[in-house]
Image (tube, grey):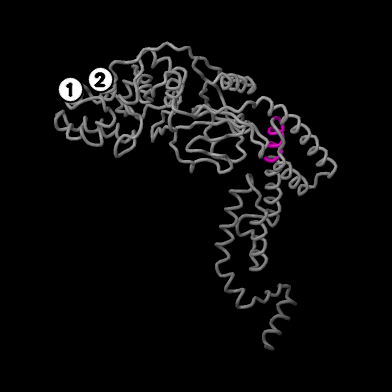
Amino acid sequence: MRVSVLAAILFSNLGYAQMPMVSPSVRGECSYATEEVRRDIDNIKEQFQESDVSVDVSALRAIVQRCHINLNNYGLGAGFPDYWERESYKAMYNKAKDQVDWNSKFGTDAQNIEQYKKYASKLGYKKTDIESYASANMQEGNRAEQSEKSKCAPSVDLRGPKLGPVRNQDGVGWCYAFAASDLLSYKLGKTVSAMGIALAYNDGWISYIRKAVFKSSEANIEGGSADSAINTAMSHGLCLENQLKSEDNGAGELMYNIVRVESLKSSSSKPTEICNWCEDNLIKPMFPSLGLKDLTGVLKNSSRATLIQNFSDKACQPKIKVNYKVKSTFMAHDKRQLFDTIDDQLNKKNIIAISYDADVLTEANFTRGMVDHQSVIVGRRFNEHSHACEYLIRNSWGRSCGYYYSGFSCEEGNIWVPKNALSRGIGDVTYVE
């Protein structure tokens, strides 16, 4: 003990700081601190520009202090935890303010106003300024809510026998075709094949080159617009679902089955050999109206590039000829024009296809707006609990509700989405007169 004390005095007199005494329990706890701090730093760096990291920063400060860790060893100055914490407050403040500014156009947004007040206070803004902003937006929201409630009446729900259950596009990027199919099915009173619409839309020389030269699968030719698809399908003639199946295709998804059939054609030149699969869960379920002779004939007279199109043409006889008028409003900067069209058609008991960002369906407080999906609106209501006008989106991901933001009401694949959220992502509307 005397040696330790003497050594401490000597080192102190020589200008060296005495090493703090660390208990055995703390020493054991700190044995993995270096790696733990590195993980905490990486996590905070990843999150601080999007969310509140104050809890993580507090934990980092605690372990740094307890285990006497120097942040310089991680290429950081001692002020970085404070910087991360304050920047995360700014991110949350900006996010809340953006939501309040947007949502007050449609109704009151008490939740985000409280978030705004919380982070404005943390950032040191004047209390009078905070309260003034919050009060002004509450008043604007109250006025907007009354207006929206009036526009949202009467409630409309156009689900029923004309449409049947929500469809499932499986793994194929043909959402536009399923939206087009719903519009045509609703008008015709019979279920139109979405696969038939997609194949008609893809029946051109560019698609043929992709299939014949670059060996693309028919299922990989994806993307389109509902309005163009409807016009193209009408010019070709419509195919019904009981002739050409767009879903429930036996053992696998539609994409898998199409790719598998094309692969069998590429690997064998004998139609009878391929038709070992004709009557089971691969080919026959997609083309239920064709017998074995028809299936074998198409296989014999088709290349891999033309196979699915030829199956479709053979199965869809006779095709249905209609000449409906298709109307669209594209990428309006003023979203009110889009919703005026939607409300007008719903009041006329007509359904509407919309192009929008699919993340609207899955994210809380959605803010972006990259149009990448199409669905159909089949209803409207004013939700007294949330004080918001909601639109009923009939999606094409099947009847499960597990994909969607839990804050939305979902009924077998039909999702009630508030107008303020939908207006962030909507791009255009299409309907059939």
Please check the rendered image and state whether residue 282 is part of the magenta-colored stretch, yes or no.
no
The crowding category of the residue bearing disc 1, from other C-alpha atoms within 10 Å (few below 14, some 14 to 19, many at least 20), is some
Counting residues from the start of the chain, the first of labels 2 and 1 encountered is 1
Tell which of 236 and 3 is nearer to you: 236
Image x and y of residue 346, in percent: 57, 22
Amino acid tagged 2: Lys
Residue 281 against residue 322 in the figure, above or below: below
The mark total stands at 2
**Considering the numbered disc 1 on the image, is that residue within a helix, a strand or a loop?**
helix
90 left or right of 326 in image: right
Q: Residue at x 67, y 59 (%)?
A: 58
Amino acid tagged 1: Gly
* Mark 2 lies on residue: 314
Q: Residue at x 71, y 30 (%)?
A: 105
Image x and y of residue 86, in percent: 71, 49
Task: Specify the farthest residue to the right.
Answer: 128
Q: Residue at x 67, y 43 (%)?
A: 91
Tell which of 213 and 409 is nearer to you: 409
Image x and y of residue 147, in percent: 71, 26
233 left or right of 101 in image: left
Image x and y of residue 112, in percent: 70, 41
Which region of the structure is painted magenta? 95-105
Q: Which mark is residue 297?
A: 1
Residue 93 against residue 18 in the figure, above or below: above
The quarter of the displayed image where residue 406 is located: top right
Task: Specify the farthest residue to the bottom.
Answer: 2
The quarter of the displayed image where residue 125 is located: top right
